[in-house]
Structure formats: structure tokens, C-alpha cells
Image: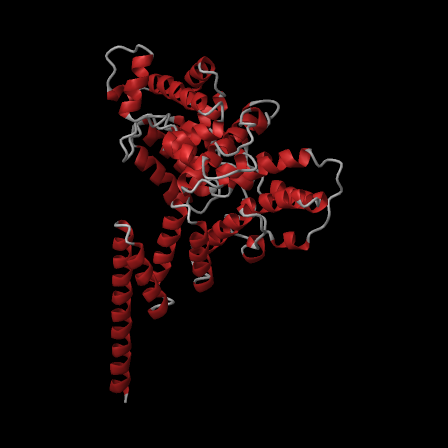
Amino acid sequence: MRRLEDVKQAFSHTQESQDDDTARRLYVLAEMARGRDDDEQHDKLLDDLRAQFPQSKWLEEALLSSYNMHLLRKEYDKAIQCAKDMYQLFPKSRYAPYLHWKAAWLTLRAGNNAGQIELYPASAETPNALYWRGRLLEEENDPGRAKAYYSRLESTFLHYYYADLARERLENLREVSVLRVPLLDRVSTVEKPAIEDIPADDFHIARARLLANAGLVDFATAEILAQSNKASWAPLAVADLYDSIGMNYRALQVLKRAFPGYYTFDLKDLPRQYWSILFPQPYWEEIQRYATRNGLDAFLVASLIRQESEFNPGAVSHADAYGLMQLLPKVGKNVAKELKIRRFSTPQLLDPDINIQLGTRYFRQLTDQFGGSVEYALASYNAGSDRVQDWRNQGKFRDVYEWVESIPFTETREYVQAILRNASIYRQLYTKTDVSKKEVASKEVLSNQ
């Protein structure tokens, strides 16, 4: 009897393996059909996957791919349907909250509401949903509830892109009485970390500093982590060590990994030393000089560099972009020619002074190309001017913020939002009074171009 059960179990595993192979084959064929724009064959294979393997991971991947295809083609009804299929068939998928938000966003763009917060109150898309629900409520002449959404957003997601926008809306609602919205109780807060000071007399830290001074950086960090990995001060000790030898980018990377939720922290929740490493100011003299020369906000330039290279002057990307501001050789050559820099060569892009000089001039050109809009310029810096112009032509938008949320490339959308968010934090850290986002972002109200 035991042997019979073993045979049945083995057969079951064999069948599961065969089913997975078949589902994978349908997925690959569907992707090939998509690649050659054979929509009829692609849709047939996707339907076969739905019918035969409704819980397969390959159907999950196929739906995500199909959603992206329809979104880029501006076939929004089909994109919404693929997103709905995904989060209904795979509600626990890592893609589900994101695709629910994208379906909700496309639905909102059509003038309707959708229940992102009800279904996914703890998702990464919650700040977006809170802000745009507030905007809809304002348009529906319900300012008291709109104020409740904005207030929850700016207090819970303190330094997020949408928290800054919420604070702007709240300025216009100062005289409005806030109404209680029970749904907002489901939006969870991020637990603040317990922070300990670095021990002044720790033997291993002293030894690590000696190793670092001798150029043995990897041994130095290992010395700290081997003895103190569970201590809350260990990431700061490692970051401080990197910072002390001029490796600002390594220090920044350490603290970003250690405190992934730092955007929700009040400035007083972490000691100033943490914030100075998370938002460093290396090459600040050069940044200020060339930002001023090109009429740019120095904090915005610092934020762009932080996003592009994390202040690593030797960074070279897979796309062959170089240095602090990640300039392509062709861009560097063209701008160097305009600035009359003689005998320019690609390796010069690894020189911080040259890189910032050329990068700020290039960003100024992009800003001028789009009528002074920082949002358009940032999107162009990441994805190219032609794509930005195409995205501008996709329809009417309430304002530039709606356009940013509508950028179809996730990388570019998050890139623009991250740089504007981080520039705001830079101002709060390094100026006595915070400058409103409105003073550096475009005030342009968008329409069909």
C-alpha cells in the first residue's frame, strides 16, 4: 500500500511538471507573438492559458506582459482588463496591488472612482491613492473629506512625493473643518526604529578604523558587522566608516538598505548624522557653481545626482552612461562642443567638475525645451525627449502632477517623483525654511498639445 501511495505521489508530481512545462510553452509562444505584433495569435494563446492553467505563474507573467503592451499602445480598456484579471486571479501576487492601482488610475482618469485603499491599504501605491481620492473629493465639492485624506497622507507618508503635494492642497483648505473617514483607520503607519548611539569605547570599531586607514575597507566593515550585526548602531558605524574615507556613495547605500522606510520618518526620528549620510553634499561647491550658472536649483541637481549615481564619480552604467550625472558619451561630446571644451574625451566624464558642468548645462537645455517644466525635463533626462512629447499628447490632464502619474514607464514615473521628493528633503535639511515645491516645479496646467 505504501508503495502504491508513493507511485501516485510521483505521478502527481510528474503531471504538475508537465502542466508547468505546457503553461510555460504557451507563455513563451505568446511573448513571441507579441514581439512580432501578431495580436490574433497572442490573444488566442493568452485565452488558452486562462482556460487551461488559471492558477499558473505563467498566466500571471503573461497578464503582466499583456497589460504593459496595451498600456504602451494606449489601448486602455484592454490594459484595465488585463490588470483586473491579474488581481482577481492572483490576489496575493506581488504584482496585484500595483496592477489594481494602475487599473484604478486609468479608471480615475476616465472620471470614475475605484477602491484601491479598501483592498490594499498597506500597499506601496497607498500614497498615490490617498492623494487622488482627495482630488476627486475636492472636485465633488466635499472639502472636509478631501482634507481628511490629505491630512492622513502628509502625516503618515511624511516625505513622500504625494505628501508634499498634499501639503499644498491643505494650504488651500485651512479654513475647512476636517471630517472623519473611518476607511483611513486602515492605513497603517511605519514603525519608527530604535536608535542607539555608537559606543565610544568599542574595541572592534577602533580596530575597524585602523583597518580602513590602511586601505583594508572590506576587512574593516566585516570587523564591525561580525561583532555587532544585531546592534541598531551597526549600520551607522559602517556608513560612518565609509563616509570618513570619502566613500559617500557606499555610506548612502548602507543606510538606505538599513532603513528602507526612512521617507516616513520625521527629521527628529533619526539623528542628524543619519540624514547627512542619506542626503550627502559631496561636490557641493561644484554643484552650486554650475547650478547657479545654468539657473537651476542646486538642491534639485544634488537630488538628480543622488538618483543617478548615488554620488559615485566612477559610476558607469550598462547603458554606457558615465559619472555623477550619468551622461552618455554622445551627450557629453555635444555639450562640451557648445561650451568650447577642447580635446574632450569620454573618460573626462568621470571627472566630477567636468561631469557636473556638462550635466547641468544639458539639464538646462531640457528644461528650456519644455517651457521651464522640471517634471518634463526630468522625464526626458531618464527616458528621452521624444517619449515625453508622445506622453504629453496622450490626452488632457488636470495638471502636471496627473501627467507624472500617467507616465507609462514605471522607472521614469518613479524617477521623476523620487528626485522631486528628495530635493524637498534636501531643502529641509540644509535651509532654515523649506521652499515649497511650487517654487521649483512647473505651474503649467496641461492640455492637448
For residue 41, which quarter of the picture? Answer: bottom left
How many dots with numbers? 0
Residue 326 vs 4, above or below: the answer is: above
Q: Quadrant of residue 251?
A: top left
Q: Residue at x 28, y 30 (%)?
A: 316
* Residue at the image position 54 percent from the left and 55 percent from the top: 120
* Left or right: 342 as drawn, with respect to 286: left
Q: Which residue extends farthest bottom?
A: 1
Which colour style is shown? secondary structure
Left or right relative to 430: residue 312: left
Which image quadrant: the N terminus?
bottom left
Percent coordinates x, y for residue 70 in the rendering: 39, 50
Residue at the image point whose x is 48% and y is 23% from the top: 371
- Tell me if residue 68 comes above or below residue 370 in the rendering: below
Look at the image and tell me whether residue 381 can be seen.
yes
Tell me where residue 82 appears, x and y as whole percent.
Answer: 42, 57
- Relative depth, front residue between 272 and 410: 410
Pick the front one: 415 or 406: 406
- Looking at the image, can residue 241 be seen? no
Residue at 43% across, 20% down: 364
Q: Is 374 displayed left or right of 39 in the figure?
A: right
Q: Is residue 280 above or below residue 341?
A: below
Residue 239: name its quadrant: top left
Give the percent coordinates (x, y) of residue 242.
Answer: 38, 31
- Choose between 4 and 213: the one closer to the eye: 4
Percent x, y for residue 205? 41, 35
* Above-or-below relation of 118 to 206: below
Q: Nearer the viewer, residue 235 or 24?
A: 24
